């Protein structure tokens, strides 16, 4: 019985860590995406030599 | 007053020339700039060959990123009024001068060209109209303001809104979300009746399967925008 409780707790902790890592990676992707967007826009604006 | 039409274009090689000529002929007071969102067809090449001013994004940022690039450009070059004018040929440049006058006279922050005030011209499919009505209801519920065509891409803004959008603009399917943000922040938003046409060519970014995702995603975004602000 005690052994089962121990493994249950381990499972809960591991699930928590995995969810935490998942959330962290999403946040990381979000930040990276924002940086890519920012850089793309600036590069594109620098390139333009407007003429009408 | 310096005015500019921002033309977001993704794979619009069939219609971009006609769209720009429409502005040149029917909205002579407006400058224009094409935002090529890393098209995989010859949109950029055609624009360059024809001498159209084109901002070419090195990566595909989606409609939100493309339009925001246009606002950044407009702010940087001192424009007073900017209008989003889709590159697929659906919008009619003959309405732009009237919209600019209305925006100025009524000191509005955003003026949306609506297909559903006078219900003339191209009205979209039944399912899309149903979706649009749903967003009208949702936005009215959250902000108290009735916007009959919250998905309309034909929207004119003043300098204040341009600066606001240059700093922050929603990413995917940004129209209903951006209207909600403005209304919640106390910007003056109104609509004016316009007529639209069926797209000249290319493909809509919202296919049938995507439309389900669109409804869910935009609903969440609109609710989040309403409560975040």
Image (tube, rainbow, N blue to C red):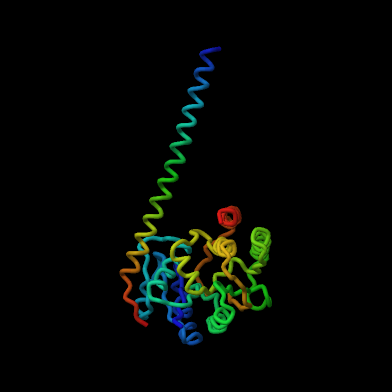
Answer with left or right where residue B40 lies relative to residue B218. left
Residue pictured at 50% horizontal, 19% vertical: A7
Q: Position of residue A39 (x, y in %)?
A: 34, 59
Question: How many numbered callouts?
Answer: 0
* In the depicted structure, whether residue A47 falls above or below residue B121: above
Residue pictured at 40% horizontal, 50% vertical: A31
**Residue B197 lies in what quarter of the image?**
bottom right
* In the depicted structure, whether residue A8 falls above or below residue B44: above
The quarter of the rendered structure image containing the C terminus of chain B is bottom right
Residue closer to the observer: B106 or B13: B106
Q: Position of residue B10 (x, y in %)?
A: 45, 67
* In the depicted structure, whether residue B206 falls above or below residue B42: above
Q: Position of residue A42 (x, y in %)?
A: 34, 64
Q: Position of residue B126 (x, y in %)?
A: 68, 65
Answer with left or right where residue B134 lies relative to residue B42. right
* Residue B162 showing in the rendered view: yes
Residue pictured at 47% horizontal, 87% vertical: B28
Answer with left or right where residue A50 lies relative to residue B172. left
Residue closer to the observer: B208 or B174: B174
* Residue B88 showing in the rendered view: no
Q: Residue furthest top?
A: A1
Residue pictured at 38% horizontal, 72% vertical: B76
């Amino acid at each position: 019985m005690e052994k089962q409780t121990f493994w249950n707790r381990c499972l809960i902790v591991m699930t928590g860590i995995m969810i935490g890592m998942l959330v962290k990676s999403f946040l990381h992707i979000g930040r990276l995406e924002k940086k890519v967007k920012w850089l793309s826009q600036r590069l594109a604006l620098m390139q333009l030599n407007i003429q009408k | 007053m310096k005015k500019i039409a921002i033309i977001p274009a993704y794979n619009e090689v069939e219609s971009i020339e006609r769209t720009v000529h429409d502005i040149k002929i029917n909205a002579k007071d407006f400058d224009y700039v094409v935002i090529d969102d890393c098209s995989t067809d010859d949109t950029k090449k055609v624009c360059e060959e024809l001498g159209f001013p084109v901002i070419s994004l090195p990566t595909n940022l989606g409609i939100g990123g493309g339009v925001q690039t246009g606002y950044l450009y407009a702010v940087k070059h001192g424009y007073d009024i900017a209008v989003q004018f889709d590159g697929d040929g659906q919008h009619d440049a003959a309405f732009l001068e009237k919209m600019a006058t209305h925006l100025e006279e009524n000191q509005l922050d955003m003026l949306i060209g609506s297909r559903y005030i006078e219900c003339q011209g191209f009205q979209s499919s039944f399912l899309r109209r149903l979706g649009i009505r749903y967003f009208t209801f949702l936005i009215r519920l959250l902000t108290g303001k009735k916007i009959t065509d919250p998905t309309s891409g034909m929207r004119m803004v003043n300098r204040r809104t341009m600066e606001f959008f240059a700093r922050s603009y929603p990413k995917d399917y940004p129209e209903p979300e951006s209207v909600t943000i403005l209304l919640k922040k106390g910007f003056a938003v109104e609509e004016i009746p316009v007529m639209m046409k069926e797209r000249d060519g290319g493909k809509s970014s919202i296919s049938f399967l995507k439309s389900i995702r669109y409804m869910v995603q935009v609903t969440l975004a609109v609710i989040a925008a309403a409560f975040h602000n």
